[in-house]
Image (cartoon, grey):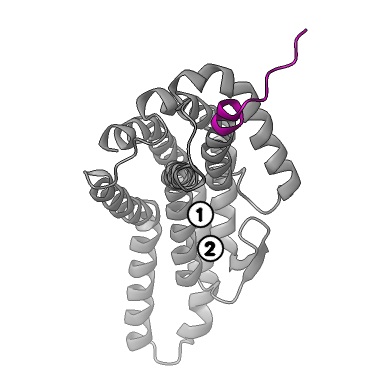
Amino acid sequence: MELPDFSLPLVQGFLICLARVAAMFAAIPVFSGAQIPPQMRIGIAVLFSMLSYPLVKAYIPTAPLSPLDLGIVIGAEVVLGLLVGFLGQLVFMAAEFAGSIIGYQMGFAAANVFDPTTQQQVALVSQFQGIIAILLFLSLDVHHLFLEALVSSFEMLPPGSMNLSGGAIPMLVDVVNHSLILSIKLVAPILVLLVLSNLTLGIMARVFPQLNVFLLSFPLNIGISFIVMGLTLGVFASILQGEFSALSERILNLFDLM
């Protein structure tokens, strides 16, 4: 077995490949969480770069670049990897935001727990829905989709050819708007019932002034919320499955627009 010739084009091409791979692994859902040690994430990125480089080296510039040009190309590759990972993160952000709204409406505003993924205090229901989204993400092999998109991105968008002046930015804005609408869809059934519950309690408070509505609202809202969450869990999973299935088209659309 002959050792590879560590020439300047080889090292330069590997660094460009590593920049795109490492940026995507730094932003891809699940793998970007703080529960995975940085050393492991760096090792996975380097290993995947070594495995994918022979497949994509034909699309990487072989001409020697100056340090400034190499830095610009690597910076563009980092931005591209982060944007692809950001598309996947939006689905998780929508699910967790919906959980935060549910938690506040059902009376769990102060019931926060430490989330090892974001290293922050998050609402209890928000973390619950985030864990469900992670389990669906892994069970549906959506992480394989990101790996396939990473390899195919070199053919569709060779290093150094990224252009953000087209329709890429408006497309990302539309996806962000869609994620906000998605969070409303996920939380709508519970919000409707909680509004009806509060309206009923308000009418009862006027009819029966001696009724302590404040103490009655807490167990009633919590019970209604948990019951509806259990009944709509299949719908919640189905909506997220549809969003994960649409990620492939969104990523390819992003590559076309850039």
Quadrant in which the N terminus is drawn: top right
Tell me, yes or no, whether the two marked residues, 2 and 1, touch with CB atoms within 8 Å: yes
Residue 116 location (% of width, % of height): 68, 58
Amino acid type for the residue under numbered disc 1: Ile
Amino acid type for the residue under numbered disc 2: Gly
Quadrant in which the C terminus is drawn: top left
Give the residue drawn at x 53%, y 63%.
223
How far is the residue under mark 2 from the one under mark 1?
6 Å
The circle drawn on residue 223 is: 2
Graded by Cα atoms within 10 Å as few (under 14), some (14 to 19) or many (20 or more), the crowding at tag 1 reads few
State whether residue 117 is above or below residue 83: below
Observer able to see residue 152 = yes
Which residue is the site of mark 1? 227
Residue 242 location (% of width, % of height): 38, 34
Give the residue drawn at x 58%, y 36%.
15
Residue 156 location (% of width, % of height): 36, 25
Give the magenta range: 1-13
